[in-house]
Amino acid sequence: MKLIVISRADPVSSRIGGILVENYGFKEAGEGFYRRGEVFLKEIGEKHIYSNGLGEDLSPELIVVASSHRSEAGMKALLTHPVGNWGEDASMGGLPRTLAPTSATALYNSLQALREEASSLRLDEWSVGLEVTHHGPATQIPLIFVEAGGPPDEIPPARVLEAVASACLKACEPRMKAPEPAIGFGGGHYAPTFTRLSLKAEYSFGHMCPKYHLPIGVEMIAQAFEKTLERPRIAVIDWKGVKGAARKALVEALEDLGIGYVRA
């Protein structure tokens, strides 16, 4: 089974859940539970990023969390990303230096779905992309976030939330084969290089570590590969998006782990 999670503590998430129930054939299957074939929808009361252990009681193959996105710069965006903390700071949920399992295939399918929906719904002012791995929750189940948002405290229009609802479902019911899985290193928070390569179907990305968290130790690099469901054996390095000393340490760590890399 696959599980979509919505949080009543997040108004955007809650509204996306309402769209899924009203428009996509989910039927009530218990208090706070809905079902469409092998895809379940679960409502939780707490903020999703702080819900450590999310979904572990149900043991799904994949969790897709519908969420709001907050941009202090006011950028309107449709986004998908894995979760976890590269460093000691776990103030936004999860555990220090711990990545949650994720799926490069689910991230790829959700990104492609967001692009398709943005085009068909004429969401011309909304960018589509990946974000790097960040925030919680910590869980043992492969998990991705699919988000919409922009200016703080502004709820996106219904058609934008419709795009996220559709992408959540398509991540659970993939229609296309994902390209070669990879782990991304370098660049900024919105992962422009990895987004471009994924939209061109050159790679599907699992965990992605931005330049502002580099250098990281061999343990965290290994964790990124081990906790991507498809077990990629290649790293894609945003070459100009990593400072020289950090890049050297990254390449040496990858070589020690026996993992190949490509420059992007």
Image (cartoon, rainbow, N blue to C red):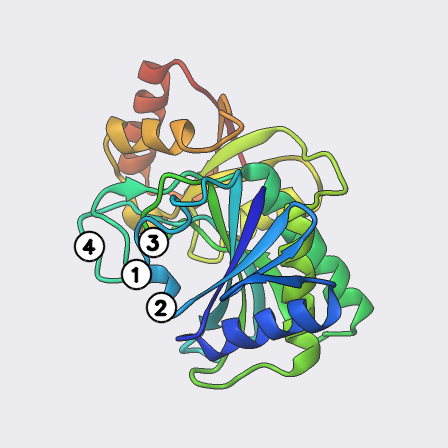
Q: Which mark is residue 137?
A: 3
Picture coordinates of residue 5, whole percent (x, y): 50, 59
Q: Secondary structure at mark 2?
A: loop
Answer with left or right where residue 136 lies relative to residue 110: left
Residue 198 visible from this viewpoint: yes
Residue shown at 43%/82% (left/top)?
Answer: 152
Q: Quadrant of residue 194?
A: top right
* Residue 51 in the image: above or below residue 232: below
Q: Residue at label 4? A: 89
Q: Which of the two marks, 4 or 1, is nearer to us in this view?
A: 1
Q: Which mark is residue 50?
A: 1
Farthest residue, direction left: 88
Q: Nearer the viewer, residue 25 or 89?
A: 25
Q: Secondary structure at mark 3?
A: loop
Q: Callout 4, which amino acid?
A: Asp
Residue shown at 61%/38% (left/top)?
Answer: 105
| Quadrant of the frame with the N terminus | top right
Q: Residue at label 2? A: 47
Q: Callout 3, which amino acid?
A: Pro
Residue shown at 43%/18% (left/top)?
Answer: 259
The answer to whether the residue labelled 3 contacts the one labelled 1, judged by CB atoms less than 8 Å apart, is yes
Q: Which mark is residue 187?
A: none
The answer to whether the residue labelled 2 contacts the one labelled 1, judged by CB atoms less than 8 Å apart, is yes
Picture coordinates of residue 12, whole percent (x, y): 52, 76
* Residue 8 in the image: above or below residue 164: below
